[in-house]
Amino acid sequence: MPQKIIEIPVDDAPHSEEVLYPGAELPRLSECALLLDIDGTLLDLAPTPREVWVPPDLATSMGKLLQRTNGAMALVSGRSINDIDLIFAPMQFPAVGGHGAEMRLSGDNESVASGAPPMDKELKRRLAAIAKLSPGILLEDKGYALALHYRLAPHAEKAIYDAVSAIRADLPNAPIEVLPGKAVCEIKPAGVTKATGVIELMTHEPFSGRRPIFIGDDVTDESVFAIMPGMNGLAFSVGRRAQGVSGHFDEPRDVRAWLARLLIDDAAKSK
Ligand SMILES: O=P(O)(O)OC[C@H]1O[C@H](O[C@H]2O[C@H](CO)[C@@H](O)[C@H](O)[C@H]2O)[C@H](O)[C@@H](O)[C@@H]1O
Ligand SMILES: [Mg+2]
C-alpha cells in the first residue's frame, strides 16, 4: 500500500495517523507547475553525492509528468544543473540549480541562465583547503559555489564551520553565504535562494499562470515553502513536518509512489 501524505493539523501536534491523499484536491496536471527537490525528496540520501540512484520507475514517472504538465515540471535543487543532468541522464528537465544560482526553462534547451559569477579563485582555494582537516571530507565544486560534505566524517562538522567562519571574518565583503545542509556546509553566492529561483521560473512559460506544487526536505527548501501561499501554491515537506506546509511525506519512496499515483488519478480525471 503506498504511503500517503500525513495531515498536519497544527505544527506541534503529535504525529497524526490520519492519511491524507490530496489527489482529489489538486488541479489537473495541465494546470500545475510541479517543482521537485532532488536529494532527500525524489532520491534516497546516499553516503556521497555521486552514489545516488534514480529508480527506473521514478525516471518513467518524471518523463510522463513532464509531458502531462506540458513541460511545467522542474527540479529545484542545490545541485548544479550540470550535475542534475548527469544524475538523470539521458533525460534532461527544466531546473533551478545551485540553490537558485542557475535556471533552465526546458530540458530541450541547452542554455542555462546563471545568476551568479564563478567564485573567486583565491577564496575557493582557501575554502577547499578545509577538506584537509580530516579524511572523509568531500569537496563538491559547483563553479559559483563550493560544498564541504562531512557525511563520512561527522566528527569534522564543527571544525569545518569554524574554519569557514574564520575565512569569512577575514573577507567580510566576499559576496557569499553559508548554507547548512544535510551533513554538508555549502558556501554559495549571496542573495540567491531556491525561492528567488522559483519566483523567476514562475514568470516564464510554461510555468506562468500555473498553480505551483513544491516538495522539499531540507532547510534550504523552507524559503520555497514560505512563498507557496502567496502564489496560490501547495508545499509538502519530506521527513519532517516543516512550518507552513500542507502535508508531509515520511520518505522519498512515499514521494515517488505519490507521483506515480498522481499520473493515474490525472488520467482518470480526463476520462
Ligand atoms: O536541494 P537538493 O536537491 O536536495 O540538493 C541538496 C544537496 O544534495 C546533495 O548533497 C546531499 O545528498 C548527498 C547524496 O544523498 C549526500 O551524500 C549529502 O550528504 C547531502 O548533503 C548535493 O551533493 C548538494 O550539492 C546539494 O546542495
Ligand atoms: Mg533536498
Image: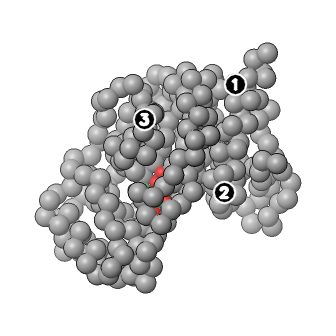
Residue 72 place in picture, x, y as percent: 53, 28
Residue 170 place in picture, x, y as percent: 19, 74
Distance CA(mark 3)–CA(mark 2): 25 Å
Residue lying farthest to the right in this orientation: 18
Q: Residue at x 70, y 58 (%)?
A: 250
Q: Please report contact status of discs 2 and 1: CB closer than 8 Å, yes or no.
A: no
Q: Which residue is mark 1?
A: 28
Give the mark nearer the N terminus: 3 vs 2. 3
Q: Amino acid at mark 2?
A: Glu
Q: Amino acid at mark 1?
A: Arg
Q: Which residue is mark 3?
A: 90
Mark seen at residue 251:
2
Secondary-structure class at tag 1? loop
Residue lying farthest to the left in this orientation: 122
Give the mark nearer the N terminus: 2 vs 1. 1
Up-down relation of residue 268 to residue 246 (above or below): above
Residue 198 place in picture, x, y as percent: 47, 39
Q: Please report contact status of discs 1 and 3: CB closer than 8 Å, yes or no.
A: no
Residue 108 place in picture, x, y as percent: 39, 25
Q: Nearer the viewer, mark 1 or mark 3?
A: 3
Please name whichever residue, 162 or 134, is drawn nearer the observer in this view of the structure.
Answer: 134
In this rendering, would 218 be left or right of 203? right
Residue lying farthest to the front in this orientation: 56
Ligand 2: does it lie within 8 Å of the C-beta at label 2?
Answer: no
Q: Residue at x 36, y 47 (%)?
A: 83
